Amino acid sequence: MDVYADAAGLVERSAAAFADGVPEHPADDGFFGPSSVTWRASGDLSAPVGGLRALLMQALHPLAMAGVDQHSDWREDPVGRLAATSRYLATVSFGEQAAAEKAAARVRRIHQRVTGTDHVTGRDYSASDPALLLWVHAALIDSALVARELFGSPPDDREADAYVAEMVVAAELVGVPRELVPVSVAQLAAYLDSVRPELACTPAAAESMAYLLDPPGLDEDLAGIWRDIRDGAVASLPEWAAGMYGYDPVPLTEERRTEIRQALGVLDAVYLGEPGVLEARQRVAGRVRAARLS
């Protein structure tokens, strides 16, 4: 395994990125707004499990993983990469439309430069390929729903469908044609099944995910919390995905689910203690209340 930088600063940098993505005086409600399911889902306690599960799923596409492995600074600054993703997601979810469009345009420009050949499959790839972008999008949305069901506030069928439909906008922003994007939970499940024959655990996927599941440099307390989040993410994977990685089954008893929820609560309290996070959360909550009253 290559030597990675340690994960010191994981909470601090991710928290700062989130706070930066929530505007203080927005000119508009962005692409979703305070009445949306997206705003509720983005604040769910289960989000860290959903985020880690999404990365585990996304890495199983050999071409998507090759782009990350060959072009990103993942090894040199893994925490910075995660923080950049947090900032982007917060901006798209809560930011003004102009800010979300600007952030997405930057991502599209970066993707245009990410091309090459996957050494495992021998296939050429481009990060701008709508098929790869759609896989990344679908894995993120599916993971958010699964994590909420297991460890957060479970959405009912109507809310889950509404979330999938709302997030079509997020896929469009990075360059996926609207007609390709699932608009319901059923369509999302069918799409994920259709991609399974293309998936594999490449050496790059195994290496990078091994880092994420046990990142070096965390202090003792945070490392313990991260082990619970890791167990939650691995346990929530589809059986076929866990099998590709060779992960041992993680029994998800009700007692274990409770322990993972408690760890998520502790992590959230730590997160809230970081500069700017409480204020950003209060801005979001205030706009949600105002929308309900109106």
Image (spheres, rainbow, N blue to C red):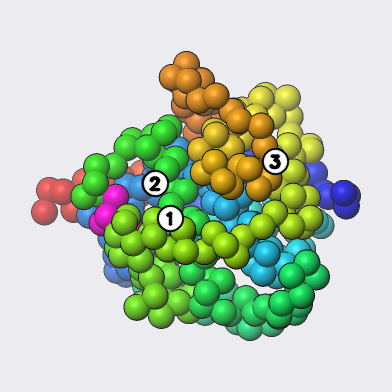
Q: Which mark is residue 246?
A: 3
Q: Which residues are magenta?
A: 160-164
Q: Which residue is mark 1?
A: 141
Question: Which one is earlier in the sequence, the residue at label 1 or at label 3?
Answer: 1
Residue 293 spot, x, y in % from top left: 12, 48
Q: Residue at x 22, y 54 (%)?
A: 35
Q: Is residue 83 visible?
A: no
Residue 179, compared with residue 83, is above or below; it is below
Q: Which residue is mark 2?
A: 145
The furthest residue to the left:
294
Give the quadrant of the C terminus: bottom left
Distance from Cα at disc 1 to Cα at disc 3: 24 Å
Tags 2 and 1 touching, CB below 8 Å:
yes
Q: Is residue 86 left or right of residue 217?
A: left
**Which three-letter amino acid code belongs to the residue tagged 1?**
Ile
Q: Helix, strand or loop at disc 2?
A: helix
- Crowding around mark 1 (Cα neighbors within 10 Å: few <14, some 14 to 19, many 20+) is many
Distance from Cα at disc 2 to Cα at disc 1: 6 Å
Residue 69 spot, x, y in % from top left: 76, 64
Q: Helix, strand or loop at disc 1?
A: helix
Quarter of the view holding residue 203: bottom right
Quarter of the view holding residue 123: bottom right
Q: Nearer the viewer, mark 2 or mark 3?
A: 3
Q: Is residue 44 visible?
A: yes
Residue 52 spot, x, y in % from top left: 58, 45
Q: Is residue 151 left or right of residue 222?
A: left
Q: Residue at x 39, y 56 (%)?
A: 189
Q: Is residue 182 left or right of residue 224?
A: left
